[in-house]
Amino acid sequence: LAKTTQPISMDSYEGQEVNITCSHNNIATNDYITWYQQFPSQGPRFIIQGYKTKVTNEVASLFIPADRKSSTLSLPRVSLSDTAVYYCLVVSGGYQKVTFGTGTKLQVIP
Amino acid sequence: DAGVIQSPRHEVTEMGQEVTLRCKPISGHDYLFWYRQTMMRGLELLIYFNNNVPIDDSGMPEDRFSAKMPNASFSTLKIQPSEPRDSAVYFCASSLGLGPVVTGKFFGPGTRLTVL
């Protein structure tokens, strides 16, 4: 089971691009990288998932280098409402016993 | 769609009492998950079901915890007897399919349990 490491916290000003990096050195061939967002007093919300290179949706982009040992979640032009905890997970099809860990607490400053 | 529905949203009970948490998954989803979140341990998977059948309950902390899914639209997580260390936020989530390339799990709002 691939372990992930991400910064405990980050601060950013409104309007800036935020990049949160996650390390997963022992990622397996069948593993996908998945990011969730959690606001206070709410359940986590799926943001984005990818296997390699780059994935983009209406919320974020996910950059995965060729060796797949790390990934970067990119949030364009953050606003105060993006203040949340962001979790990086490595999951494989059919295997669900994943602990979210402590995530990265992003604080957006006006 | 109303999303995943959990009840109650808050529960305060005394040590030794039985606690029952309830979850209604998103209609049509075939997987249901129960998670527990604490400051110390983060968000942990307790158990998950597929088509109402428990698949992996290895995350259930001890015999005081039990979960059932009598039908596709309802699940319960029961703690008997409850202890102060069970105080946490309990989330229920559901998904359609189990492959990694899905839109991910949909989480409910959680039940904040406080055991005095």
Image (cartoon, coloured by chain):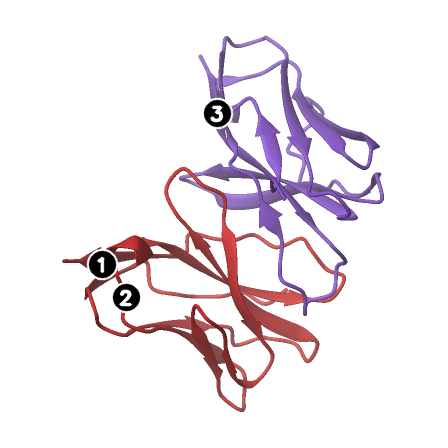
Chain colours: A red, B purple
Q: Describe residue B82's horizontal placement relative to residue B14 as left or right.
A: right
* Mark carried by residue A108: 1
Q: Are marks 2 and 1 on the same chain?
A: yes
C-alpha distance separating marks 3 and 2: 34 Å
* Camera-side residue of A41 and A104: A41
Q: Position of residue B85 (x, y in %)?
A: 49, 24
C-alpha distance separating marks 2 and 1: 7 Å
Q: Position of residue B73 (x, y in %)?
A: 77, 34
Q: Describe residue A8's horizontal placement relative to residue B79 as left or right.
A: left
Q: Amino acid at mark 1?
A: Val
Q: Amino acid at mark 3?
A: Ser
* Quadrant in which the N terminus of chain B is drawn: top right
Farthest-out residue, left: A110
Q: Residue at x 44, y 12 (%)?
A: B116
Give the SS element for disc 2.
loop
Residue at the spot of label 2:
A78
Is the residue under label 1 in contact with that under label 2 (CB below 8 Å)?
yes
Q: Is residue A18 above or below residue A99?
A: below
Q: Are marks 3 and 2 on the same chain?
A: no
C-alpha distance separating marks 1 and 3: 30 Å
Local crowd at mark 2 within 10 Å, few (<14), some, or many (≥20)? some
* Mark carried by residue B87: 3
* Circle 3 or circle 2, nearest the eye: 2
Q: Is residue A96 above or below residue B10?
A: below
Q: Position of residue A55 (x, y in %)?
A: 52, 80
